[in-house]
Image (cartoon, helix red, strand yellow):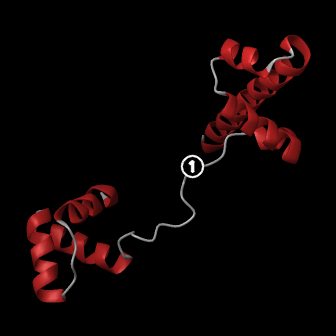
Amino acid sequence: MSSTITASAERELERRAKHKLAVLRHAEEVSGSVAATCRYYGITRTCFYKWRKRYEAEGFEGLKDRSSVPHRSPNATVPEVIEKILWLRRQYHFGPQKIAKYLQRYHEITISPPESGGSCTRSG
């Protein structure tokens, strides 16, 4: 089943890349004007030039959508702290405010209540 999902996702990436290629070709072959092509397709010229730069550098593969996940997250909560938060949540059914106060008082870990609540929500 998962191969079907990935295959459909791959098809969607291909479809979008082909659309981008069609936009680039339209500017070259049909209109001859980047501004007119961008108006026709409803995209910005900045976006057009970004696509063209990627296409010139990487070919068709450069037109495929890229992940928007950050390469690093320096302010992410440390896994050990997340474990403590989840343990407090499961063991004592503490809420975000109480978890933040408990960690500050007994472990000298400063964390905001929304951050402790978010860790619980993300981890299930």
Q: Residue at x 88, y 41 (%)?
A: 56
In this rendering, position of residue 106 left or right of residue 59: left
In this rendering, position of residue 32 left or right of residue 109: right
Q: Residue at x 57, y 63 (%)?
A: 71
Q: Quadrant for residue 15, please give it.
A: top right
Which residue is disc 1 drawn over?
68
Residue 53, visible in the rendered structure: yes
Residue 91, visible in the rendered structure: no
Name the spot of residue 123 as percent of width and height, x first.
33, 60
Name the spot of residue 38 as percent of width and height, x first.
70, 20
Secondary structure at badge 1 equals: loop
Q: Is residue 123 above or below residue 54?
A: below
In this rendering, position of residue 10 left or right of residue 54: left
Q: What amino acid type is highlighted by mark number 1?
A: Ser
Which quadrant of the figure contains the N terminus?
top right
Q: Residue at x 25, y 63 (%)?
A: 115
Q: Is residue 56 above or below residue 83?
A: above
Which quadrant of the figure contains the C terminus?
bottom left
Q: Residue at x 60, y 44 (%)?
A: 2
Q: Is residue 38 above or below residue 117?
A: above
Q: Is residue 43 above or below residue 1?
A: above
Check the image and name the residue furthest to the right.
29
Name the spot of residue 106 as percent of width and height, x first.
12, 88
